Image (tube, grey):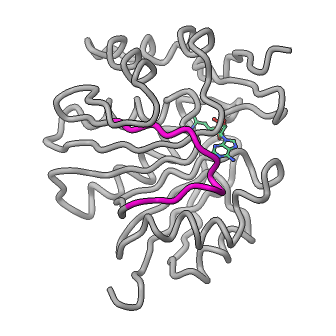
Amino acid sequence: MTSWSLRVTADGSHTVFSEPYQSTYHSMHGAWQESMHVFIQAGLFYVLENHEYPRIRIWEMGFGTGLNAFLSWLVLQERPVHLDYLAIDLNPLPPSITNQLNYPKLCKHPHAVRTFDAIHRAAWGQPFEIGPHFTLTKIQTDLSHYHPEGAVDLIYFDAFGPGCQANLWSKEVVQEQILPLCQKGTILTTYSAQGLFRRNLQSTGFLVTKIPGPPGKREMIRAQFLGKQDQ
Ligand SMILES: C[S@@+](CC[C@H](N)C(=O)[O-])C[C@H]1O[C@@H](n2cnc3c(N)ncnc32)[C@H](O)[C@@H]1O
């Protein structure tokens, strides 16, 4: 059985449909638009607005198509910031799918095709220099068994929805996997506004804000870690 198939979303960008999870990787209202709204505008631009960073460290739950990594690289091109991007995924997509994704064709950057290709060719399990200002580390692992090392500035939480994989939005995951990635000020964004996930974050030391979501989604979450007791 084929596990994945390509779909075209309303803004013309591709997404992937997962047979086992019976879910698309992005909103059918527009994959590119959703990633730009939820992760880049509400996350990356928000972090950059509030701090001056020579380096920014991003951690992503659910690498998938690599769209969030690619967009993060793309929007940082005009800024003097080094991107350290760490992403996990339990079931990486095969080249037969990633080679067909149309994301690099949707922007005019001269290095888009080469960079998107490098993002997918990078070996799993070790850091890879995609370019002089972009280090990518992809780790194949189950989120619930993942042992994070070191804090990050920004978390893109892009698991399949709580209705599909409730265990990945649980208090245990917030405490065991998300919290160790946080230092005072770490920002987390996600497309979901689920009440239980919001409360799980709040009870673990996050200030949680509901903000307008992308087309097709009224609200989403941006959360800021307020610090461990000794910070
Ligand atoms: C919503 S998709 C991610 C979309 C991705 N960020 C993108 O832009 O294409 C969810 C991802 O989580 C991965 N996943 C599912 N269960 C997982 C688990 N237990 N641990 C880690 N990754 C998991 C899937 O393989 C899939 O790539």
Indicate left or right for 30 with 112 as reference. Answer: right
Most extreme residue toward the bottom, as rendered? 229
Q: Quadrant of residue 30?
A: top right
Q: Which residues are magenta?
A: 136-149
Residue 164 in the image, given as x and y percentages of width and height? 82, 47
Q: Nearer the viewer, residue 120 or 106?
A: 120
Indicate left or right for 131 with 197 as reference. Answer: left
Q: Quadrant of the C terminus?
A: bottom left
Q: Is residue 37 magenta?
A: no
Q: Is residue 219 above or below residue 209?
A: above
Residue shown at the point (38%, 17%) measured from the top left: 107
Residue shown at the point (33%, 37%) measured from the top left: 127
Residue 157 in the image, given as x and y percentages of width and height? 56, 52
Indicate left or right for 19 with 32 as reference. Answer: right
Picture quadrant of ligand 1: top right
Residue shown at the point (78%, 51%) measured from the top left: 165
Residue 184 in the image, given as x and y percentages of width and height? 35, 76
Q: Nearer the viewer, residue 148 or 79?
A: 148
Residue 136 in the image, given as x and y percentages of width and height? 35, 36
Residue shown at the point (67%, 55%) measured from the top left: 192
